[in-house]
Amino acid sequence: MKTKRFFLLAIIALCAMQASLGLDLQKRVKGNEQVVTEDRLAEAFNGLFASGSIDIQIKYSSIQAPLRIEAESNIVPLIKTSVKKGILYIEFEKRRSISPNGPVRVIISVPELKTITLDGSGNLIFGSGFDQSSLEATLNGSGSINFIDTKVEQLDITVNGSGDLRGSIFAYKDIRMNLKGSGNIILSVGDTKTIRANMKGSGGIQLTGKASNTTLRSSGSGMFDCQSLTTDHADIKMSGSGGGRLSVTKKISVNLSGSAGFTCHGKAKIGSYKIGRSSSFRMQP
């Protein structure tokens, strides 16, 4: 009797495993190598949220054009697009394991985007031609955002994780950036009034251009590589083992703790000055 019961339980377990495996295989989609293009209409939007391994290309257009999707024919239906409260959402169908063999690209043509958020390992290119009052850009994960000669008055950047945000973006008034993790921000910023950068972790911020006032804050082992950024006034506060350099023309205030090190290029006057026992600060004309 016990033997029959054992075999019955074994058969039930085997059937359950086969059913689970079959369901799992149904959820897996492998690209069929037949690349197609599909245009989709979308409601009006001025923000973007994209997730997954999808490449996004943003182009300037005087009017909003249909979304153009380029992917394999059995992948295109699994790319979901929707607009909620003025935000365009682009993501793969949930509960699917998708393995493309070709490109997965969405091309967006709009007159303006106020916010962009990229989650995951995708790539986003923000093309030239945009000239707008403000832009908030957020990168979460291991993806990348690349700006090409974008113009804004106020710029707000957040990078979380190991991704890279780079390119040329000219902000006339104010630039704020926050970096957390091991990612990088590499930007040519033109001539702006105020730059405020905060970094936590082991990442790096590299800036080129001019500014009236620059504030740099960091904790961890990150690096500010800003010798090619020339600013009139600078306020530096660093803790941990990180480092940095910046070109300053008028006045710099410094507060370093831990084993942080910083180099000021130029002949700026030194304002408030606090250097920890294991920290280092030097002026280099």
Image: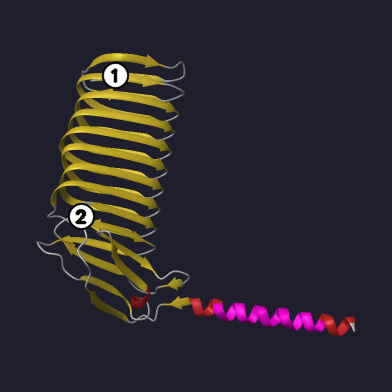
Label 1 sits on what residue type?
A: Ser
* Between 68 and 211, the one nearer to me in the picture: 68
Label 2 SS = loop
**Which residue reaches farthest left?**
62
Is residue 247 placed above or below 177 in the rendered structure?
above
Residue 257: give x, y in percent of width and height: 43, 21
* Between 28 and 11, the one nearer to me in the picture: 11
Label 2 sits on what residue type?
A: Leu
Range of magenta residues: 7-23
Q: Residue at x 21, y 73 (%)?
A: 41
Q: Quadrant of the C terminus?
A: top left
Left or right position of 60 against 259: left
Residue 20: give x, y in percent of width and height: 61, 77
Residue 27: give x, y in percent of width and height: 49, 76
Q: Residue at x 24, y 33 (%)?
A: 195
Name the mark nearer the viewer: 1 or 2. Answer: 2
- What residue does disc 1 label? 253
Is residue 158 placed above or below 263 in the rendered structure?
below
